[in-house]
Image (spheres, rainbow, N blue to C red):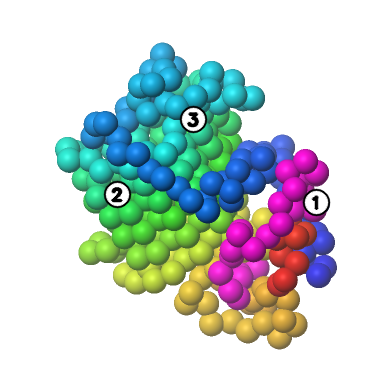
């Protein structure tokens, strides 16, 4: 329990350098995940090249006004491109936006691609991204201080690829069967710093393994790491955390690998209370 109790303090210390986890969004994600009814997107892809392209009723935008309090919402779409384009591509924006509750599959390029957007403006959660030819979720050219969580990513060449993007929180994602046919890890970080990745489940990523990090980001948040299905360590104190660390090539380490998969649905969320205390305690109360 000592490891669990320290989680809230650790998260608070990290707030100054990374995106703050929005507990209201997490609560909504859990509720919406019970039943999701996707609507076929009336086109091959969503492309937003500036704030002017955020228009309700076009480009997949359902609601919002672009403020931090009322971000643009892109949700509820089933997108299956028939041309070589990213399924959702957003660049050159300063407005706040959320991409959530979408089914993105069988794309010939990338699933979700964020490129050169303003820091702290993007939240991507509860999407199912599968069977894309290139990257399921690509963040490059300076995608900073954003939240990426609770996505189900499978059977794409890359699961998550981040390049020159810093201070993001990547957690609670399921990554399975990446690098089908290519020697590429499920999560690949290139030239990135101060990103925190924890509570992610890496399962059946067979060719080149689960992750690669060339600069040394944080693969745990100080108490809780990720679930790696090939981890063979022991848990002698039965606290749900492996007794030995998990190496992430080339320069990183998960110091607190999980013995069983992370499951956000098993936790109790009260978004009206301090998220950096009660939520994280309850999320791991059964470990």
Residue appearing at x 64%, y 63% in the figure = 266
Residue 134 in percent (x, y) is at: 27, 49
Does residue 246 appear to the left or right of 54 in the view shown?
Answer: right
Viewer-side residue, 239 vs 81: 81
Q: Which mark is residue 220?
A: none
Q: Earlier in the sequence, mark 3 or mark 1?
A: 3
Q: Position of residue 222 (x, y in %)?
A: 71, 59
Q: CA distance from mark 3 to mark 1?
A: 28 Å
Residue 274 in magenta stretch = yes
The stretch in magenta equals: 256-279
Question: Which residue has dot 2 on it?
Answer: 105
Question: What residue appears at the point 80 percent right and 44 percent down from the top-left corner?
Answer: 274
Residue for badge 1: 277
Is residue 130 depicted above or below 87 in this figure? below
What residue lies at 42% left-to-right and 39% top-to-bottom? Answer: 76
Q: Residue at x 52, y 77 (%)?
A: 231
């Amino acid at each position: 329990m000592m490891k669990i109790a320290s989680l809230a303090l650790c998260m608070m210390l990290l707030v100054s350098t990374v995106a703050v986890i929005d507990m209201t969004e997490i609560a909504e994600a859990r509720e919406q995940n019970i039943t999701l009814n996707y609507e076929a997107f009336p086109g091959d892809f969503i492309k937003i090249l500036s704030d002017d392209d955020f228009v309700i009723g076009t480009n997949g935008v359902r609601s919002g006004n672009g403020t931090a309090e009322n971000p643009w919402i892109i949700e509820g779409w089933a997108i299956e491109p028939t041309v070589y384009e990213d399924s959702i591509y957003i660049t050159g924006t300063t407005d706040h936006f959320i991409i959530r509750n979408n089914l993105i599959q069988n794309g010939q390029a990338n699933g979700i691609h964020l490129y050169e957007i303003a820091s702290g403006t993007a939240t991507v959660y509860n999407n199912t991204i599968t069977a894309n030819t290139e990257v399921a979720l690509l963040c490059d050219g300076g995608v900073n201080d954003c939240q990426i969580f609770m996505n189900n990513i499978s059977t794409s060449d890359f699961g998550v690829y981040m390049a020159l993007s810093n201070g993001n929180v990547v957690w609670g994602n399921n990554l399975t069967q990446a690098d089908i046919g290519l020697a590429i890890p499920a999560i690949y970080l290139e030239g990135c710093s101060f990103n925190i990745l924890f509570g992610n489940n890496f399962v059946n990523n067979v060719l080149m393994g689960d992750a690669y990090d060339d600069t040394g980001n944080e693969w745990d948040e100080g108490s809780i790491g990720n679930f790696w299905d090939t981890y063979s360590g022991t848990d002698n104190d039965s606290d749900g955390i492996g007794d030995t660390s998990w190496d992430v090539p080339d320069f990183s380490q998960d110091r607190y690998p999980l013995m069983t998969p992370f499951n956000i649905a098993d936790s109790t969320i009260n978004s009206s209370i301090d998220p950096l205390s009660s939520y994280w305690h309850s999320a791991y109360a059964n470990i």
